[in-house]
Amino acid sequence: MRLRPHRRTLVVWSSHAGPDRYGLPWFTRGARPRRIRSCIRTGALLAVIGVIRLARAVQADWRLGAGVVLTVVGVMLRSNPVGVVMIPGLLFLVVAILAPASPKPARSRRAELERELGAYSTPAERRDLEATLDLYPDGVTYELRDILASQVAARR
């Protein structure tokens, strides 16, 4: 028993290799319109979900969200004149990333941290908190340590 030769005699089942009724060759048939519409709907739904999640993530700075939306629209429509909106989108992104955080939210966050750390009033509680902070690097806990030091100085 020997192996059969691999594809020596190919059989052509259909000799029609010309373009179909839309003028496209047989190997480049377009997708059905219903399938394309469902893909567009799915893509739009995923885009909306992504924009909603992004909006939750960047509630503090509206410029970041606006920059992302304008940049995405500009990239999607880059062959149209509307694609020019990519330039302001990129500018919004650069400003949002490079600009320092606004002082009002930072101040309110620090005041909230001071109130929470004020609950550690006894020396034993302070030692426990400082022992916990010693487990983490100073780059992560520098703000907490600064608040604790200022509270100790204010008590003296």
Image (spheres, rainbow, N blue to C red):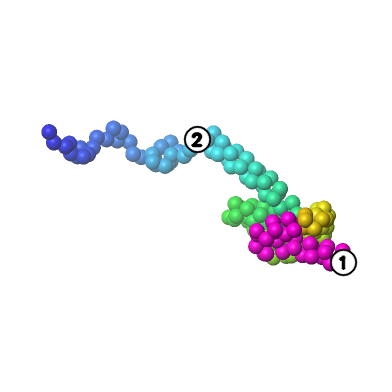
- The span picked out in magenta is 127-155
Dividing the picture into quadrants, the one containing residue 26 is top left
Q: Is residue 135 visible?
A: yes
Quarter holding the N terminus?
Answer: top left
| Mark 1 crowd level (few <14, some 14–19, many ≥20, 10 Å Cα) | few
Q: Position of residue 145 (x, y in %)?
A: 75, 63
Q: Label 1 to label 2, Cα distance in Å?
A: 78 Å
**What kind of residue is marked 2?**
Arg
Mark 1 vs mark 2: which is more N-terminal?
2
Q: Which residue is mark 1?
A: 156
Q: Which residue is mark 2?
A: 32
Relative to 107, 22 lies left or right = left
Magenta stretch encompasses residue 64: no
Above or below for 150 versus 85? below
**Residue 97: image location, x then y, percent:** 68, 62
Percent across and percent down for residue 21 are 43, 36
Residue 79 location, quadrant: bottom right
Residue 110 rendering spot, x and y as whole percentages: 80, 59
Which of the 4 quarters of the picture holds residue 17? top left
Q: Amino acid at mark 1?
A: Arg
Q: Is residue 134 magenta?
A: yes
Foreground: disc 1 or disc 2: 1
Horizontal relation, residue 69 to residue 154: left or right? left
In the foreground, 58 or 77? 58
The residue closer to the viewer here, 116 or 93, is 116
| Residue at left offset 50%, top offset 35% | 32
